[in-house]
Amino acid sequence: MPTDVENWKSEVYGNEIRDHLFEFAERGFDSIPDDERDAWFERFKWWGLYHQRNGQEGYFMMRIGTPNGVLEPGQLRVVGEIADEYARGPGTNPIFGDAYADFTTRQSIQLHWIELSDVPAIFEKLEANGLSTQQACGDSWRNIVGNPVAGKDGQEVIDAWPVIRELNETFKGDDDHSNLPRKWKVSVTGSADGSGQGDINDLAFEPAYKEVEDEDVVGFNVRVGGGLARNEPRFARDIDVWVPPERVPDVAGGLSALFRDNGDREDRYNARIKFLVDEWGPEEVCETLQAEYVDFELETAGRDVREEYTYNTGEGERNDLVGVHDQKDGTNFVGLNVLVGRMGAADVLDLADLADEYGSGEVRLSQRQNVIVTDVPDDALDEFLAEPLLEHYSPDPSPFMRGSVACTGTEFCSLSIVETKNRQVRFARWLKGNVELPEGVEEFHIHLSGCTASCAQPQIADVSLRGMKTRKDGEPVEALDVGLGGGLGDDPGFARWVTQRVPADEIPGAIASLIDSFAGEREEGESFRAFVARHDDEELDAFVDPEETDYEDPMMHNTKRTWYPYAEEDGLDDAPPVPADD
């Protein structure tokens, strides 16, 4: 039997949702019938809107899709203006204030506290400036990711930006691909550093060489079935296919249609292509694609460049794109660290000014929740790096700041078990002030995810943190499972979950103990990931020695149901009323 979601989608889905959304916006939130709210909230996701958690009725998170993280000149300013005008609600975050933008691990932008009545005006402003929320969520093609500096990067093998742009234009809004069994996440990478993170996507195109008519041609090898969600992580698997750039839309559409027709619509937990690849195997996926979904002969896989992958590997250069880097046109791109991906609206506007003043006005977003200012000439570089804003968004941050990634958490998300954004900021600041990494270790990734949905991509971090609950001194407290040694590269590996349910206030001390053990027992030049690999789980658990420190965690006792975790009066009975239709 189809799931409830499939039944709702069979009644209304895709582009037609927009008309209903605007009708509800005009009539007000209360015009959505109580017994239909679950259905409409599920449908609204297709247009980038998630209803926020219990106690925040009438408020939405809005996700803006930016393919490959590219924000053209003027677009970042539009985001800042919308955040400043519309993303203010009844709750004030003690660290970030009450108007901000979140940059995500999929190179998108999220705004919070959006009222339904404001959606038409926001859509009008976004679309007038080439931006959209269409299919930013929902069971369809999501935001396409890749190396954010595609077309500019001095190290790329092939410019993937035209391919990504064509895929976005082809499949966003395409009725034939608008109702898939679940989300469809695509990565297209043209660089040799692996910064598209194709291994953790449903569909990945990675740079590869193929001899065609006695000539070495650059195109893409194809991998299918990656993903991190829940407790079933998979790396995408090689289906032995190589495609030239002009054939990428055909193969991508064929695999999307294959998933559409064969994915599980009776069990949403099982409705991801990674499970279909488990069942069929890569060879059958390839055979079915050839037989039923493309009308040309597929080429076998070419010579890849995976041995050169450095992004999120834990060693070597270009573990991320923070810092100053050469563009192939002789200018520079400058990656700025945005701690846990959140930037105040005023800072967003200031950064837009700086991008105009020192570069072309273009800004790009990375999968590590950071921002990149492109096209900065050499003679403007020093002045740009001296700007006061860069004291807060540094191109040369502490490894603990640089390596911090966090999901939305209980501030807004109904799935999350613990608070995340503010907590990871506090973790990073404490570690920066109290812990030193061994000599030669310049990056250390800590990812905090509020639940097993893995939006913070914890399984591919040096230290993985996942929200749980426990009891301490007889009282319920927020806690975190600890995993170690994840990362990507030529030989990707998932973190091993070695320690469970550590009270949140003991995590910084546990990480300090872990790093102390690493420093003391490290072999010469050994990376943290290699250190983890040569120890068993019992040994690693002993290294993660939870202990009390002077670190304080004001959120750890927030285990009851609240309307907002930072409010003084935070019980559900204290929740603000549904916003008026004005």
Image (spheres, rainbow, N blue to C red):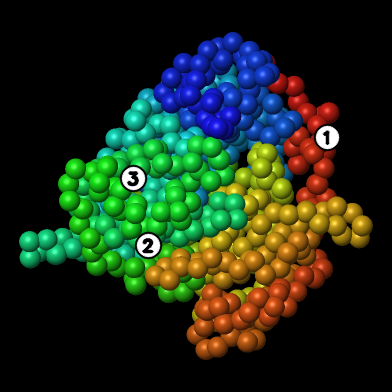
Question: Closer to the camera: disc 3 or disc 1?
Answer: 3
> Disc 3 to disc 1, how far (Cα)?
47 Å
**Extreme residue in the left direction:** 213
Query: Vertically, is 546 above or below 275?
Result: below
Type of the residue with mark 3: Leu
Kindly identify the residue that appears in the image at 48 percent across and 24 percent down.
Answer: 10
- Image location of residue 429, percent across then percent down: 67, 61
Q: Amino acid at mark 1?
A: Gly
Tell me the tag on residue 194: 2
**Residue that numbered label 1 is attached to:** 571
Q: Residue furthest bottom?
A: 524
- Residue 67: image location, x then y, percent: 38, 42
- Residue most toward the top? 27
Q: CA distance from mark 2 to mark 1?
A: 45 Å
Quadrant that contains the N terminus: top right
Image spot of residue 570 (x, y percent): 81, 36
On the picture, is 182 further left or further right than 186? right
Q: What's the residue at 70%, 54% (across, down)?
A: 467
Q: Secondary structure at mark 1?
A: loop
**In front of the other: 337 or 555:** 555
* Circle 3 crowding by C-alpha within 10 Å: few under 14, some 14–19, many from 20: many
Q: Residues within 10 Å of mark 2 (few under 14, many from 20)?
A: many
Which residue carries the number 3 mark?
Answer: 255
Q: Is residue 495 above or below residue 575?
A: below
Answer with mark 3 or mark 2, whichever residue precedes in sequence.
Answer: 2
The amino acid type found where label 2 is placed reads: Gly
